[in-house]
Image (cartoon, rainbow, N blue to C red):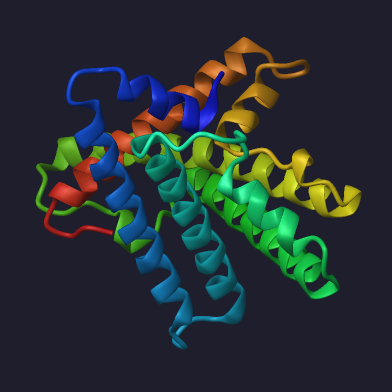
Amino acid sequence: MAGVPGALRSLLQRPYGLPVIWAVASGLLGFGLWRIGRAAGRRRKAFWRIGEAAAGAGHLALAWSAWRVALRMGGRETGAARLSIGWLIQYPAGRLALRVAAVAVIAFAAASIVRGLTGRIPAGLNPKGLPGRVRTAVVRAGRFGLVAKGVVLSIIGYYLLQAVAELDPGEFREIGGSLRVLSRPPFGPMMLGAVALGLIIYGAFLWVLALSDRPE
């Protein structure tokens, strides 16, 4: 499982792969800046804003990975997230910020799982302008995706805490690394397949949400 950079490099080898990667990188940049902009607002609680800032930073790291692939930048295959963690981990304030971000990610993951299981999804994730049965099916798919997203985020948050505790950014796991964790005992291929399917469904759900009358 090659992770995000490997998937992007594979896409680069396909026809029209380069324009697609540039589009993905631009979208990730815009989404990351939007999340950070939301974090800068003062209408929400501090813990929510920390979670938004962490999510924004994650999307910016993914955008950087996409740009590296698009520009065919060589060098050491170290993710932008690990480079950032390696820099922050050297300082006490940086380690504190990483711990707070990890706890925020885990809390957000837990909230996603609970919302997915109970059906209490945020209003922004409730698509409008769809026929009743179609909307019900879309929301159910979104709930399944929320649970899968929460599982992956909880692993990411856990390994971020591990990286700080061990003072080793190599302990950190991004999306690809988190899925590899799920492929090992005690989880196994069935859990990995279910979570991967959930992430695919969640991506499709977000497309439907974006095309509905009330995007997130």
- Is residue 111 found left or right of 15 in the rendered image? right
Q: Where is residue 49 in the image (x, y as percent from the top left)?
A: 53, 74
User: What residue is shown at x 40% (from left), y 34% (from top)?
Assistant: 72
The picture places residue 179, in percent across and down from the top left corner, at 60, 26
Q: Which residue is painted at 28% across and 52% down in the image?
A: 26
Q: How many marks?
A: 0
Instruction: Say which residue appears at 41% left-offset and 66% top-offset.
Output: 35
Residue 176 against residue 38 in the figure, above or below: above
Query: As drawn, is 130 to the left or to the right of 40?
Result: left
30 or 211: which is nearer to us?
A: 30
- Based on the displayed image, in which of its 4 quarters is residue 202 positioned? top left
Q: Identify the residue at image location x=65%, y=22%.
A: 180
Quadrant, the N terminus: top right
Q: x, y (%) of residue 13?
A: 31, 18
Is residue 139 found left or right of 95 in the rendered image? left
Q: Which residue lies furthest to the right in this view?
A: 166
- Quadrant housing residue 174: top right
Quadrant showing the C terminus: bottom left
Q: Nearer the viewer, residue 70 or 199?
A: 70
Residue 98 picture quarter? bottom right
Residue, far bottom = 42
Q: Where is residue 20 in the image (x, y as percent from the top left)?
A: 23, 35
